[in-house]
Structures are given as structure tokens and as C-alpha cells.
Amino acid sequence: MSTGAEKHCIGLAGEYLVAGMMSLKGWIANLTSKNCPSFDVFAYNPEIDKNVNVQVKTAKNSRGFLVGLKHNELDRIEEKIKGPYVYVYIDDKNDNVRYFILSREEIINLIKDTDRDYYERRTTRAKATREDYLVAVLVDWLEKYEDKWDNLWK
């Protein structure tokens, strides 16, 4: 399988896994057609009469997840992130799946805080020469959000 196809399949697997977990929890969950840039799964929970649109990011054999913004674009974070995020981490050794669920506010704050910390630790030379690095969220930073499905409707 090519790298592009493999990446696509991993992303799609994460979306199906999230929709499946939401269905098990009583949500009526569906995947979007792939031309919706702000979310991947839309769902309705008839028990609480709420809709939610979820962005899914999936990683396999990686320490973290790219956010989809560069450091010098973080002023657009409020418009970029429309709703809650579910990070799906697939362990490459045994295909064990972990879910990290963050409300919109939680993911925005996490990205800002962790990027600020990363940026401040960089050397002066690195700051001066490179403001367009890709922002990422490491798996270690997400652990307190593991299996926090209630964050979907915060």
C-alpha cells in the first residue's frame, strides 16, 4: 500500500471507530462525505436531544497528531476549530485503540498552551528563522482526556 493510501485508510479507520463507539453509547452517528473540512462525524443523541459535529484525528505508529495549523497561523484557531475533537491512537504493535475526547474549548486551550510552551523552549535562532512550523499535539498531553466521551457535548 502506498504512503498516501495508507494514511487515508488509517484516517478513515479512526472515523469509523469513533462512529462505532458513539453508536455503542446511544448516538446515531454518521460519517460526512469527505468534502467537509470542519468535521468528520455528525451525530444525534435522542436520549438528550443533542446534535454534535466531531473532528477526528487518527495516528498509528506516531508520538502525536498534527493540528492542521502552523505556528504563525494560530490566530485563526477559533475559526479553524468548530467543535469537539476525538484523537484516535492506534498502537502499531497490537492494534490496540485509545480514544482521547476534548471539547472545543479544551482542544483550543491545549493547543495554545502546549505550542506556547514549545515555542518558548526554542532557541532564539530557531525562533528568528522558523515561524511556520506545524503545530502538533503529543499523545502524552492527551492522557487526561482518555475515554472522556462526555466532553463531546460540553
Image (spheres, grey):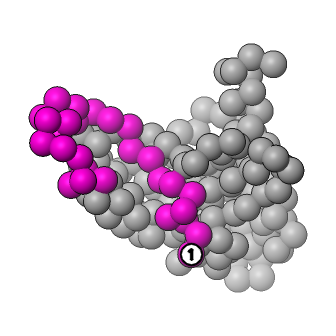
Q: Nearer the viewer, residue 9 or 133?
A: 133
| Left or right of 26 in this view: 101 | left
Give the quarter of the image for residue 84.
bottom right
- The reply, left or right, for residue 36 in relation to residue 112 is right
Q: Secondary structure at mark 1?
A: helix
> Closer to the camera, 138 or 103?
138
Hey, which residue is sitting farthest top in the picture?
2
Residue 87 can be seen, yes or no: yes
Q: Residue at x 56, y 75 (%)?
A: 144
- Whole-percent x, y for residue 8 in the image: 71, 30
103 is higher (above) or lower (below) than 111 = below
Does residue 74 lie above or below 54 as drawn?
A: above
Query: What is the count of numbered marks?
Result: 1
Residue displayed at 55% across by 49% down: 64
Residue 141 belongs to magenta span? yes
| Mark 1 neighbour density, 10 Å: few (under 14) some (14–19) many (20 or more) | few
Determine if the magenta segment contains residue 22. Answer: no
The magenta region covers 118-144
Q: Residue at x 36, y 60 (%)?
A: 114
The answer to which of 121 and 135 lies nearer the viewer is: 121
Quarter of the N terminus within the rendering:
top right
- Where is residue 56 drawn, in percent x and y? 63, 51
Residue 39 screen position, x and y as percent: 58, 48
Across and down, in percent, residue 58 comes to 66, 46
Residue placed under numbered mark 1 in the picture? 144
Q: In the image, what residue occupies the spot 70% across and 82% down?
A: 48
Judge whether residue 39 can be spotted in this image.
no
Q: Give the residue type at disc 1.
A: Lys
Image quadrant assignment for residue 112? bottom left
Q: Is residue 150 above or below residue 92?
A: below
